[in-house]
Image (cartoon, rainbow, N blue to C red):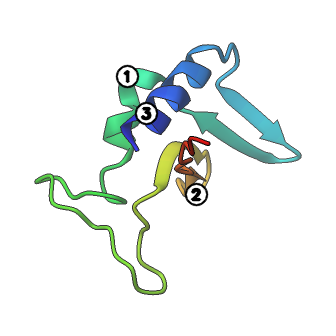
Amino acid sequence: MKKRRDEIHHFLNKLNEREISLGYAGYTISKNMHLEDMQLGYSMDSDGRSLVGTNHGEWKENWFVIGYHDESGDPIFIKLFLFLDFKQ
């Protein structure tokens, strides 16, 4: 999972624009230095305890917050995929 997060950091580093408008809705993509803080309240609480669960409606381990909706504050998150290397 760490490798996938590093790839996301690398990708987000290349973004020139961090504010996105779709019609009347505005979204902000966080800078890398804020990404770990963006996970608070979603994948972990302020004491560092996990909020991840496996039940319906609970935060999933492979969800990673990268930004938020400007009006509502709702998170924009991506689903990290783990790819396995198979040797033939």
Count of residue discs = 3
Front tag of 2 and 1: 1
Hey, what amino acid is under mark 1?
Met
Task: Work out whether 15 lies above or below 58.
Answer: above
Residue sitting at x 72%, y 42%: 26
Is 22 situated left or right of 69 in this image? right
Residue sitting at x 54%, y 31%: 8
User: Residue 6 placed where, x, y %?
Assistant: 45, 28
Secondary structure state at the residue bearing disc 3: helix
| Disc 2: which residue | 72
Is 25 situated left or right of 8 in this image? right
Label 3 vs label 1: CA separation?
A: 17 Å
Front tag of 3 and 1: 3
User: Residue 62 placed where, x, y %?
Assistant: 46, 57
| Disc 1: which residue | 33
Label 2 vs label 3: CA separation?
A: 31 Å
Within-10-Å neighbours for mark 2: few <14, some 14–19, many 20+: few
Residue with the most extreme right position: 23
Determine the image quadrant of residue 88: top right
Residue with the most extreme front position: 88
Going from the N terminus, do you reach mark 2 or mark 3 first? Answer: 3
